[in-house]
Amino acid sequence: MPVYIDQIGKELVLSSIPKRIVSLVPSQTELLYDLGLGTEVVGITKFCIRPDQWFRSKTRVGGTKQLKIDIIHQLEPDLIIANKEENVKEQIEELGKKYPVWTSDINDLSSACQMIEQLGTITGKRQRAIEIKSQIRENFSRLTTPDSRLTTAYLIWQNPYMTVGTDTFIHSMLEAAGFENVFAKEHRYPETTIGELQKIQPELLLLSSEPFPFTQSHAEELRVRLPSTRVVLVDGEVFSWYGSRLQYAPAYFSRLREQWL
């Protein structure tokens, strides 16, 4: 039987190509759709909003952090797809006692592309996965790095304000997009304050649409508090979804740079 090693180093043994898949990660759910696994995917989370037809029709198994284990049991999956950061370790370990669980660990473009190819291989869609990975690589190869990078802060949460450190996928996307993360010396998702931002005075402040849905009113409020900083609302999915959506990220980054550089 084939033995696979997931991105946290755990062995996964599958007797056949999975026919009942539960995906616990929004960006990877969208990838499974683009791989052509419409019949095989039987369960998703309430945050797996893309594609819309799956969001409306597939069985929901709770949120990424609060899974409804009983519903997953009812679905009788032969493969569960999880993520080290987005899912709760204890819940994944519990599921792993009964089902094959493949867990990703994504911090940059390379690990995202590796995940895409590996999931394609496991699900019998290797050729399509390679096509998606190749398109992502090609599109990013065309993305040039500007000589002058705007010092940038990226907010993902309010009350308290939270940003991104160097060991996150969002940081790697900021770098690829040509921005200089002013919190690059920090790790994971540190808290920050208006006072700290006023002291740092980043040239650009990006307000993500997720996980906290920043709006125009939030942007206007921050512009008053940070008059020397350009405050911009951005599509958080482009910066944080590490599946097939990455195909479209370089074009979005280029448009964003053209607007603010």
Image (cartoon, rainbow, N blue to C red):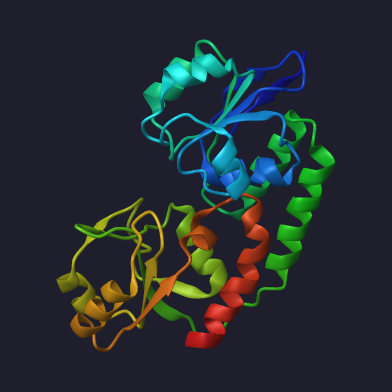
Can residue 37 be seen at all in this image of the molecule? yes
Left or right, residue 201 beside residue 86: left
Closest to the observer, 174 or 187: 174
Q: Where is residue 119 in the image (x, y as percent from the top left)?
A: 69, 35
Q: Position of residue 149 (x, y in %)?
A: 48, 81
Q: Where is residue 16 in the image (x, y as percent from the top left)?
A: 77, 17
Q: Quadrant of the N terminus?
A: top right
Closest to the observer, 34 or 118: 34
Question: Please, is residue 111 above or below residue 237 in the view?
Answer: above
Report the number of numbered marks. Answer: 0
- Pick out the residue farthest to the front: 56
Closest to the observer, 156 or 172: 156
Seen at 47% across and 74% down, the residue is: 179
Can residue 147 be seen at all in this image of the molecule? no
Q: To which quarter of the image does residue 225 belong? A: bottom left
Q: To which quarter of the image does residue 164 belong? A: bottom left
Q: Where is residue 199 in the image (x, y as percent from the top left)?
A: 19, 77
- Pick out the residue farthest to the right: 127
Question: Please, is residue 88 above or below residue 236 in the view?
Answer: above
Left or right, residue 128 beside residue 73: right
